[in-house]
């Protein structure tokens, strides 16, 4: 069975400003990032759809200790965002000085943009890197 | 299914970087386990060995075959288990199933890791491999960051002011360090204070250095045998009576269930149901306190405390010896250390000695039923329940 939306196509679309998901014809729920089956019901009858790129921050952290090769990125903020369509995605909050990050960030409305993570020796190849900015 | 007993255990001290190789560390633990079981290496019918990072720490994959050969268990089937920090718990569970099935009578199982030897940048990078490489690592996700995300979510979900939660979390580390003092094999054997925790370097907000377990080197091994074989070996067998294992997808697909980890609840239920016991029957528990918040989350999902109330339990001393449910009296991952693939087997060893009454100053008097809880990455959970067999 072939994927309706692969990592590469999802990642390429995001780097052109489009956030793609998969809409399940069985239960109507959206799955993003893509996978073989619906995250809610494991159905396989899925259609690629373009999403609104809007959501709310559900949690965050300011990272001060980075993995090998990424030390020049600290400090950076990772956030989990609940999209208006329901799914959660992980990315970086770029609109605020990490020193000012606090619990007040939770529930803030954001828009999804992107940067590109160029990969490293263990994970070669460009990967879209969602970034969030305040609405 | 046949009953399966633990009859031998061995573990190295858990330490900062050591010059011993992974095979040397594991072989030392394995020979101690085989000797305690009054067996010889040629009695071992199979080896199940947890090891995650040998490829990166030593350029050594396929360590299981060389380890079997090293101890003189020539040509036995040897299988490597990789389930991040839960690797050797998965190995114990599988070894249990193979002995219970009647296929084997004697299996050696354990794990080894040299995480401290890798140094912090490489260790942090390789631990990040236990997250989703394509959809979450691009954001820079690290292990502390994952539990930092869960900490803020925990505070929000249960309406606990972050400062209050941080103090409760600090008490988890303080308690683990207190008990680590009594464990001669622990990496840290000194007490710390709440202030020490709250003044530490911020690793990933709000987790500070002493909210985090260390990188460690070490190995642990146990011998599992059939009930019939156990009777030949010891008057004090410890039986594994319940096993559970479950998995989940990347952190973001777990969404609304967080900060609870559903895989833990599925796994724990399997183990409780199989053993025919519940949380109130557990006398001593070794759970996966890779971060202070992780201990709070685990204790709730195992059914010891209500959701959002673990912090109060630590405050009241309910997790100490003499309390409702003594937790991590070995020192836990925080003070004993966390050589990731050795951790699950090491937890089993602590429960084994607790049930046999061999833990000295950190003994839980009269313990009859014990439980382990091991988490790998954001998606591997394993629980084991053990009971006194005499
Ligand atoms: Zn569906």
Image: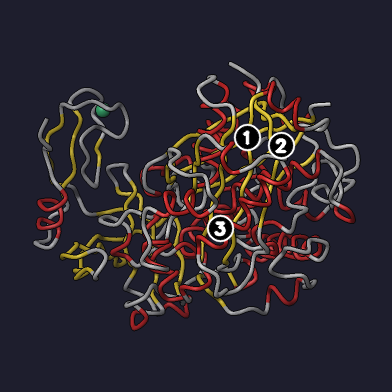
Residue corresponding to mark 3: B151
Q: Position of residue B233 (x, y in %)?
A: 75, 32
Residue corresponding to mark 1: B224
Please tell me in which quarter of the rendered image ligand 1 is found. top left
Q: Chain of mark 1?
A: B
The front one of A85 and B30 is B30
| Residue B167 located left or right of residue B69 | right
| Residue A43 located left or right of residue B127 | left
Instruction: Check residue A31 in the rendering and tell me which mark sits there, or answer none.
Output: none
Return the disc, 2 or 3, that comes first in the chain's sequence.
2
The front one of B142 and B74 is B74
Q: Are marks 1 and 2 in contact (CB under 8 Å)?
A: yes
Which mark is nearer the camera, 1 or 3? 1
Q: Position of residue B234 (x, y in %)?
A: 79, 32
Task: Tell me what residue is drawn at x 27 percent, y 65 percent.
Answer: A122
Task: Tell me what residue is drawn at x 19 percent, y 50 percent.
Answer: A52
Above or below for B32 versus B170: above
Query: Which element carries disc 2, helix, strand or loop?
Result: strand
Task: Tell me what residue is drawn at x 12 percent, y 55 percent.
Answer: A18
Which mark is nearer the camera, 2 or 3? 2
Residue corresponding to mark 2: B7
Q: Do the residues at pointers 1 and 3 share their chain?
A: yes
The front one of B130 and A58 is B130
For marks 1 and 2, give the CA distance.
Answer: 6 Å
The front one of A108 and B139 is B139
* Quarter of the figure with residue B238: top right
Q: Do the residues at pointers 2 and 3 share their chain?
A: yes
Q: Chain of mark 3?
A: B
Cβ of mark 3 under 8 A from ligand 1 = no
Query: Which element carries disc 1, helix, strand or loop?
Result: strand
Q: Residue furthest bottom?
A: A72
For marks 1 and 3, give the CA distance.
Answer: 38 Å
């Amino acid at each position: 069975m072939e994927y309706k939306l692969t990592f590469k196509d999802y990642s390429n679309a995001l780097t052109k400003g489009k956030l793609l998901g998969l809409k399940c014809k069985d239960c109507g729920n959206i799955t993003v990032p893509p996978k073989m089956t619906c995250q809610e019901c494991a159905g396989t009858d899925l259609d690629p759809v373009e999403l609104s790129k809007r959501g709310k921050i559900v949690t965050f952290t300011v990272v001060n200790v980075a993995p090998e090769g990424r030390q020049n990125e600290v400090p950076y903020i990772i956030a989990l965002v609940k999209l208006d369509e329901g799914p959660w995605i992980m990315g970086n909050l770029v609109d605020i000085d990490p020193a000012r990050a606090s619990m007040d960030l939770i529930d803030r409305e954001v828009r999804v943009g992107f940067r590109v993570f160029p990969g490293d020796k263990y994970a070669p190849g460009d990967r879209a890197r969602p970034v969030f900015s305040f609405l | 299914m046949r009953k399966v007993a633990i009859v031998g255990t061995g573990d190295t001290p858990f330490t900062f970087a050591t010059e011993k190789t992974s095979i040397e560390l594991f072989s030392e633990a394995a020979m101690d386990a085989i000797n305690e079981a009054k067996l010889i290496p040629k009695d071992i019918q199979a080896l199940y060995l947890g090891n995650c990072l040998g490829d990166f720490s030593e350029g050594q994959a396929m360590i299981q075959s060389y380890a079997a050969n090293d101890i003189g268990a020539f040509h036995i089937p040897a299988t490597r288990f990789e389930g991040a920090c839960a690797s050797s718990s998965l190995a114990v569970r599988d070894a249990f199933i193979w002995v219970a099935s009647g296929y084997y009578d004697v299996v050696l199982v354990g794990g080894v890791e040299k995480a401290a030897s890798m140094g912090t940048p490489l260790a942090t990078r390789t631990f990040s491999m236990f997250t989703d490489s394509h959809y979450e690592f691009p954001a820079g996700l690290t292990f502390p960051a994952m539990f930092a995300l869960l900490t803020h979510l925990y505070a929000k979900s249960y309406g606990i002011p972050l400062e209050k939660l941080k103090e409760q979390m600090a008490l988890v580390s303080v308690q683990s360090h207190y008990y680590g003092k009594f464990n001669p094999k622990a990496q840290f054997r000194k007490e710390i204070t709440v202030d020490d925790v709250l003044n530490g370097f911020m690793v990933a907000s709000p987790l500070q250095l002493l909210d985090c377990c260390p990188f460690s080197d070490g190995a642990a091994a146990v011998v599992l045998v059939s009930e019939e074989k156990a009777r030949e070996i010891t008057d004090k067998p410890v039986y594994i009576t319940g096993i559970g294992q479950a998995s989940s997808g990347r952190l973001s697909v777990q969404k609304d269930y967080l900060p609870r980890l559903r895989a833990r609840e599925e796994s724990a239920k399997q183990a409780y149901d199989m053993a025919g016991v519940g949380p109130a029957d557990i006398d001593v528990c070794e759970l996966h306190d890779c971060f202070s918040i992780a201990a709070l989350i685990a204790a709730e999902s195992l059914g010891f405390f209500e959701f959002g109330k673990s912090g109060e339990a630590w405050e009241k001393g309910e997790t100490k010896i003499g309390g409702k449910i003594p937790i991590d009296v070995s020192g836990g991952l925080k003070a004993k250390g966390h050589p990731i693939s050795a951790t699950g087997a090491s937890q089993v060893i602590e429960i084994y000695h607790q049930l046999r009454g061999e833990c000295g100053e950190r003994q839980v008097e009269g313990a009859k039923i014990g439980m382990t809880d091991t988490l790998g990455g954001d998606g591997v959970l394993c629980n084991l329940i053990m009971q006194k067999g005499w």
